[in-house]
Image (spheres, rainbow, N blue to C red):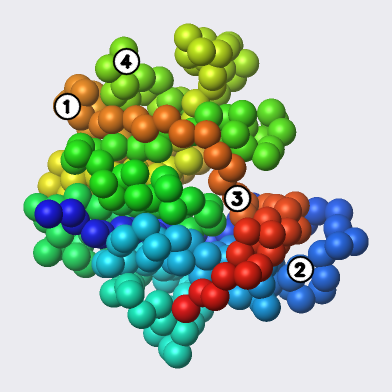
């Protein structure tokens, strides 16, 4: 029986989105204000002003998931307020967990901590697998369904970097994935340098990257999330680090599914207009409810 569970990580403080940049003439005042004040996933870049997260939830629903846990920030109730109101996706059981900020910190403790706190609120999933995704990336129904249907307890989507509608400099900010000959993950390299990128190209000349979309078994990943060390540079507990700890202790435990497609990424203000155009093109004639 499939475990139709998914966790959406939406507890960050959107610091990169709020960095000041030269004002894009195409970015109207309303969107600029939202970018500086809202969770990224709630910016109204969609058709008729719908928030970005509507489209991720639509794809989640169409892919066949039922139980959705959204991990939200301690200082932002906008997501919970919106999806607890009239606009609820009827096929989804949406629940919320709050990522609490430890005393003495000004921001959340990262994605590993967000998932750890989230899993503590759904202990009924303990013997089950779940998919986990970012809230500011629009993963396709295809990618989401691959993980839902996977025969493996732990898996990830392994993207061909050439499939992204992004420049090479942007790809360098992502994490490259290294696999063994059987297709199982052996390492994730965050923000690789030039030499690491050159060595990561596979036999087909493809550089594959992780976009933080994993299928994980609750009782396998849990303790690695709990004991995940703090990244000394970013001062956060990061999900890829916990995943690497898991595969080090359990070799050939996470299978990589290679696909090539664009993944809209709503990270910076510069992403707003391209994302808005993409959503209008892809979802303009689709009724989302």
* Residue furthest left in the image: 127
Mark sitting earlier along the chain (4/1): 4
Residue that carries the numbered disc 3 in the rendered image? 264
Q: Secondary structure at mark 4?
A: loop
Q: Residue at x 83, y 70 (%)?
A: 28
Helix, strand or loop under label 2: helix
Residue 63, percent from left and from top: 37, 57
In this figure, which residue is indicated by the disc labeled 1? 250
* Visible residue check, residue 53: no
User: Residue beneath label 4, please?
Assistant: 180
Mark with earlier residue (1, 2): 2
User: Mark 3 or 2 closer to N-term?
Assistant: 2
For the residues labelled 1 and 2, say whether their Cβ atoms are less than 8 Å apart: no
The residue that disc 2 covers is 32
Residue 164 picture quarter = top right
Q: Earlier in the sequence, mark 4 or mark 3?
A: 4
Q: In the rendered view, tell whether residue 168 sits above or below residue 234.
A: above
Mark 4 vs mark 3, CA separation in Å:
28 Å
Camera sees residue 93:
yes
Asked if residue 99 lies left or right of residue 166, the reply is left
Secondary element at tag 1: loop
Relative to 35, does residue 126 appear above or below in the rendering? above
The residue sitting at the right extreme is 25
Decide: is 243 above or below 81: above
Q: Residues within 10 Å of mark 4 (few under 14, many from 20)?
A: few
């Amino acid at each position: 029986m499939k475990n139709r569970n998914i966790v959406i990580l939406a507890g960050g403080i959107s610091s990169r989105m709020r960095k000041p940049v030269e004002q894009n003439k195409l970015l109207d005042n309303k969107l600029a204000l939202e970018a500086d004040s809202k969770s990224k996933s709630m910016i109204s870049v969609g058709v008729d002003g719908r928030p970005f997260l509507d489209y991720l939830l639509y794809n989640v629903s169409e892919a066949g998931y039922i139980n959705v846990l959204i991990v939200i920030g301690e200082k932002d109730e906008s997501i919970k307020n919106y999806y607890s109101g009239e606009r609820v996706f009827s096929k989804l059981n949406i629940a919320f967990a709050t990522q609490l900020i430890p005393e003495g910190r000004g921001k959340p403790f990262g994605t590993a901590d967000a998932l750890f706190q989230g899993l503590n609120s759904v202990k009924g999933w303990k013997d089950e697998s779940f998919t986990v995704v970012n809230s500011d990336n629009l993963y396709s129904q295809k990618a989401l369904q691959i993980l839902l249907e996977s025969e493996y307890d732990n898996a990830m989507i392994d993207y061909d970097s050439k499939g992204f509608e992004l420049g090479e400099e942007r790809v360098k900010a992502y994490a490259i994935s290294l696999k063994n000959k059987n297709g199982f993950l052996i390492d994730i390299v965050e923000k690789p340098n030039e030499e690491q990128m050159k060595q990561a190209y596979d036999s087909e000349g493809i550089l594959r990257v992780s976009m933080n979309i994993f299928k994980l078994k609750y009782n396998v990943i849990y303790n690695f999330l709990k004991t995940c060390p703090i990244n000394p540079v970013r001062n956060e507990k990061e999900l890829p680090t916990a995943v690497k700890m898991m595969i080090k202790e359990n070799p050939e435990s996470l299978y990589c599914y290679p696909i090539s497609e664009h993944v809209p990424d709503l990270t910076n203000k510069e992403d707003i207009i391209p994302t808005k155009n993409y959503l209008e093109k892809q979802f303009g004639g689709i009724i989302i409810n």
